[in-house]
Amino acid sequence: MATSSQSIIQIIDLHKSFGSHEVLSGITLDVPAGSTLVILGGSGSGKTVLMKHMIGLLKPDSGRVIVDGEDIVPLGPEGLERMRRKFGMVFQAAALFDSMTVFENVSFPLREHRKDLSEDEIRALVKEKLGIVGLKNVEEKYPADLSGGMRKRVGLARAIVLGPKIVLYDEPTTGLDPITTDYVDEMILDAKKELGVTSVVISHDIASAFKVADNIAFLYQGHIIDQGHPSKLRHSENPAVKLFLSTWFGKN
Ligand SMILES: Nc1ncnc2c1ncn2[C@@H]1O[C@H](COP(=O)(O)OP(=O)(O)OP(=O)(O)O)[C@@H](O)[C@H]1O
Ligand SMILES: [Mg+2]
């Protein structure tokens, strides 16, 4: 496959098994800088496993993962730590610290990585990021005081607080009502338009996928069985892709 200097993430012939279970059987993917890639696929197809390789949370059995021009597979803890500063990650479960307030949760990455900032600067940044996700006056609340959708948005605010080049979203809209889903979709689009952020989004939600994606990759039985612009995927001849999409488009 041709490699492009415009790619911010490149995955080349990635293989990963757990025991005798081969989850990824030769994945090759290219994410152009500033674009949004949506990874679609059924439950258990390996979407989260694939995403974890992008940020070095899992090591492949073979294959390469190139982030911003650097193969991250051989990196040790320090190299990984440096590389991960380029990323924001929204985990599948909101994964907030329950014993910390919203302010403490969102400011956490700043305290870890931006020791140069003053308390006032941290306050201002947290407020700004909460504003971007449509929340205000929630700094002193605890996660348990918030709705599921609000918790998800706090997770998003935390993911973007360091101003990452790349944001990985694992099922950002699962379990949200349609209005909040729309809100999260708009946020992904805004982050691209206003901040030039590259996004990789795992989704089950076909409507959201078609709304936010520049490219869609469809993962099935360890392979990317089709990929490209949403309009290409919409007319895919692949039976598994057609079946998956018919669950949505068939009804509309
Ligand atoms: N650490 C692990 N050890 C063993 N097996 C694992 C591990 N992580 C994932 N798997 C297996 O890999 C397969 C893919 O898991 P993954 O979480 O990537 O699926 P997914 O596509 O994200 O599914 P979902 O849409 O339900 O989140 C599953 O069969 C899972 O059980
Ligand atoms: Mg998953």
Image (cartoon, rainbow, N blue to C red):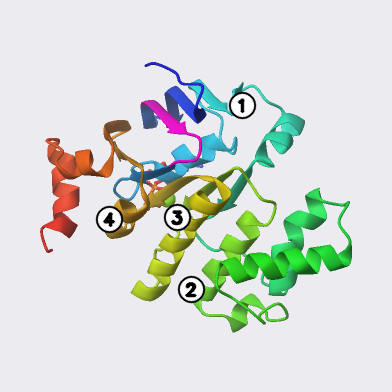
Which quarter of the rendered picture does the C terminus lie within?
bottom left
Element type at marker 3? Answer: helix
Which one is earlier in the sequence, the residue at label 3 or at label 4? 3
Residue 150 location, x and y as percent?
A: 53, 75
Which one is earlier in the sequence, the residue at label 3 or at label 1? 1
Q: Residues in magenta?
A: 26-35
Which one is earlier in the sequence, the residue at label 2 or at label 3? 2
- According to the picture, the residue beneath numbered tag 4 turns out to be 206
- According to the picture, the residue beneath numbered tag 1 turns out to be 72
- Which amino acid is tagged 1? Ile
Q: Residues within 10 Å of mark 1 (few under 14, many from 20)?
A: many
Which one is earlier in the sequence, the residue at label 1 or at label 2? 1
Outermost residue, front direction?
194
Q: CA distance from mark 2 to mark 3?
A: 18 Å
Which quarter of the rendered picture does the N terminus lie within?
top left
Element type at marker 2? Answer: helix
Residue at (59%, 39%) from the top-left corner? 57
- According to the picture, the residue beneath numbered tag 2 turns out to be 149
Q: CA distance from mark 3 to mark 4?
A: 16 Å
- Which amino acid is tagged 4? Ile
Residue 78 location, x and y as percent?
A: 77, 32
Numbered circle sitting on residue 8: none
